[in-house]
Image: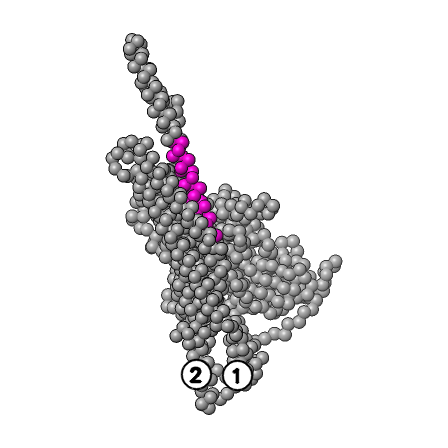
Amino acid sequence: MADPTTYTASSPLKGVQVEALVVMKITKHSSQTFPTIATGALVGMDVNGILEVTNCFPFPTVDVPSQDGHQDTSNLAAAAPRAKANVAYQAEMIKHMRDVNVDANNVGWYMSTNMGNFVNLNTIENQFFYQRDINERTVALVYDVNRSSQGSLSLHAFRLSPQFMSSYRENKFTTESLQKSGLRYQDILVELPLTIHNSHLLTSLLHQLPTPPPSEELKFPADLADLKSDRLTKQPPFDPNYDALDLSIDPFLEKTCDLLLESIEAHHTELNNHQYYQRSLGREQAKITAWQQKRKAENAARVAAKQTPLPEDEWQRLFKLPTEPSRLESLLNSRQVEQYARQVDGFTPAVSGKMFAVKSNLLPGEGA
Amino acid sequence: MDDKDSFLHLARPLGPAQVGAQPVTAPLSVTIQPQAIFSILDHSLRRNPDQDRVIGTLLGTRSEDGTEVEIRNCYAVPHTETAEQVEVDMEFQKTMLSLHLRANPREVLVGWYATSAELNTFSALIQNFYGQQGDGTWPHPAVHLTVSTEPGREIEARTYISAPIGVTAERADESCLFIPVPYEIKYGEADKSGLELIAAAKDSEDRSVGVMGDVESLERAIEQVLEMLARVSNYVNEVIDEEASPSNALGQFLMNALSLAPKVDPADIERDFNNHIQDVLVVSYLANTIRTQIDLSNRLATAALTLGPESTGGATGGEGGQKDRQDRRGDRNKGRQQQNRSAES
């Protein structure tokens, strides 16, 4: 594996190009397993800095009886990409895919999420595992089930920044090391621009599927039943998606508030941990100072009594300073909050626009 | 997908029933999910240059009585075909099937696909292999899906099941009667947003498209709706001016649509509107405030030790100052939490 710092300087990944097939497979898998997190592997290849994702396959999930509690299963599912059994599964699958001329290189993994709630230790560990052990040029595709059902597709490609990689490798997230490396929570994940790509055959197929209304003259339908059974009116076209006009506000707001509260609570816990650490550090240091003074006084007495002085650095053995809790959690939490805030920012203009439209529609003359 | 020809589909027992087996009727409907088709097309593009067609296995679900089959997934199986013989990698098929079933335990083997519309002796052979007892789909008939992938032509899909037919016992293995069955391509609600984006790329030269934001997709949808409204009102005006010929059916349809407009009190609308817009703005405001606060908190946490030489020299002093800050921050956080709770209720 190339060193991340020299590597990115030479040829960073410029973007991710996802085949339509992969999009469909991910949406299918994610909506099937919802609300459990779905994970899978991506295969494809790297062409001049653009990572082409051409196929993917889901990871088997461990079916745990639901009595164990929701948390356990979702944790297991989220940890699937780095589970040992799945690494073997992946190798086997890729070996077989090579036989049918699929680009048999692992280029990352995908996961589904709910309302952007994906910045956590599991995601980071998975991506770290991929970027470190398998291939530097790997991405994580994150598909948001909930957001996608409300209109536009929410699929994003993320990588861990080289800075974060080196910090995580040493597992050093103390205040001091953060200052030295200058790592901020904004720098943990790097988002890559993502494009969707169709094959020629698929383009051909898409032109046969529901399309926007034709612009030429049409014949008049004979009666209402005829109109309703018309092929053109049966299914709305894929593009544009009229689901985007749906006006549902409260569920989104509720969920966002819940998630924000959760984050604040997590932040608070982290703060408490740190305060506890500070207090116990202070206490220990006070003890050490007291001990040092006592030893000094003792030594002075011993010198006066013509005895050999006792060593003054014994405190290092006697007292143990508490270790500073890792700041990683709070960093991730901050990143998560940022994600929520961005999400709300994206939601607000669209929904307020829709609301003003509805209002002026129902109250003509007032809004205008 | 194609209305060029139609079949009359009859459900009937297939051929002579095997001893001890229930007579099987044809699956009356086959549903294909788009990702299966996408996958087949992808496979067809990746075939070896000397191959005319490629085949693969279809996975999906079958209703209890076997009359409804939903094709959900598929994978490619390598095979070689010459004028005299056909060879399917059975080992590959078996391992791949078990690998797929591990990830999707609810899916079962339902049949196979080929990427040419042609049916020949080899098709019958492969069909019998997929429909056999043991590893095959028996006692249900295997579904055969053909997708023609000739460049420049329409992509045509056909689904078949088969009935045994044979002149003699020896030839029964390599012959069967393909019966066309109806199928539908169906997409779920969850696939819609994905399909939208994919479809958005269909008219662009390089066949690719970036991911759109919420506002952009809303804008496109609204533009489209406005265009359609303009077209309808244009038509209505023309009818009123006696320039276009009227249509009873369209008139009826428009009446029905217009009668769906709700009658609500303006005061109610005003109230609801204000409530909701306030909710949205408050949540947006809060989310951004929280983001700023947390950003601040992070900066303070790491900035505490860079106050100057005196703080790096005396660790206790620096830590003390930091602790103090954190306490204050904690209080602020509590305050914000309460604020947020009250906003939510």
Secondary element at tag 2: helix
Which stretch appears magenta?
A257-281
Secondary element at tag 1: helix
Q: Of residues A288 and A244, which is closer to you in this image?
A: A288
Magenta span has A280? yes
Judge if badges 2 and 1 mark residues of a common chain: yes
Q: Residue furthest right?
A: B20
- Badge 2 vs badge 1, beta-carbon distance below 8 Å: no
Q: Chain of mark 2?
A: B
Q: Chain of mark 1?
A: B
Q: Residue furthest left?
A: B309
> Residue tagged by mark 2?
B234
Q: Position of residue B299 (x, y in %)?
A: 33, 44
Q: Position of residue A20 (x, y in %)?
A: 45, 61
Question: Can residue A129 be seen here?
Answer: no
Q: Of residues A287 and B194, which is closer to you in this image?
A: A287
Q: Amino acid at mark 1?
A: Gly
Q: What secondary structure prevails in the magenta region?
A: helix
* Apparent side of residue A357 relative to residue B141 in the rendered image (left or right): left
Above or below, B67 against B104 in this view is: below
Q: Of residues B304 and B130, which is closer to you in this image?
A: B304
Residue at 43% across, 51% down: B339
